[in-house]
Image (cartoon, grey):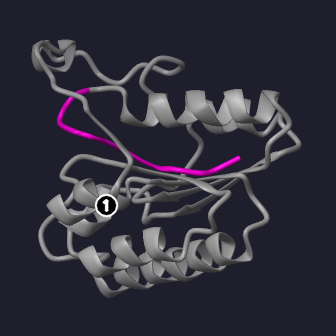
Amino acid sequence: MKGYVQVYTGNGKGKTTAAIGIAVRAAGAGLGVFIIQFMKNGLYSEINALKKFDNIFVEQYGAGQFVKGKPSDAERAKCRQGYKRLCSIIEAGQHDLVIAEEANVACLCGLLSEEDLLHMIDIKPEHTELILTGRGAPAAVIDKADLVTEMREIKHYYQQGVAARVGIEK
């Protein structure tokens, strides 16, 4: 089966949800899935669910907090470590689906470069499906992708002060 490059971007809710949904579908079909989460660290409800699958592997390479301003050396090091790991996973070609969650945001924050994202795409084996998520996908990544979905926020209850709820947003 030919693998494609998918990008889920935009300021609306649902980018991670879409990628996780595809991961579950792929796992249900017996495919091997590898997810690297840039910018995230900690226990999210979806991680608890994904641990129940023998063929989904998740690694986190975030500082566990939002990057504000110039990224710290520790944030840069963690992201570089994740990037190197992701490239080795992609090149090995052992997983049918590889998800680089929040890769676009890592680029937006200066933790990854546009060239890093393009390199992920360039080294992808023919059979591997690659998904990049996060707001602010660079134009060059959008151009190179096979499928791009932009989530656009029209209305969100966060604006009324509703915090992220366990099981729904986290």
Q: In the image, is 150 to the left or to the right of 101?
A: left
The part of the image, by quadrant, that contains residue 48 is top right
Q: Is residue 2 magenta?
A: yes
Q: In the image, is 85 to the left or to the right of 1?
A: left
Residue occupying the point 51% across, 37% down: 19
User: Residue 80: image x %, image y %?
Assistant: 45, 82
Q: Is residue 132 magenta?
A: no
Give the extent of the magenta segment: 1-12
Instruction: Residue 113: tell me if it is visible.
Output: no
Mark 1: amino acid: Lys
User: Residue 17: image x %, image y %?
Assistant: 47, 28
Residue occupying the point 58% across, 72% down: 86
Q: Is 106 or 42 nearer to us in this picture?
A: 106
- In the picture of the structure, the residue carrying the numbered disc 1 is 144
Tag 1 secondary structure? helix
User: Residue 113: image x %, image y %?
Assistant: 27, 78
Q: Is 155 or 43 nearer to us in this picture?
A: 155
Vertical order, 6 against 46 (above or below) = below
Q: Is 95 or 112 nearer to us in this picture?
A: 95
Vertical order, 156 against 45 (above or below) = above
Residue occupying the point 38% across, 48% down: 146
The part of the image, by quadrant, that contains residue 115 is bottom left
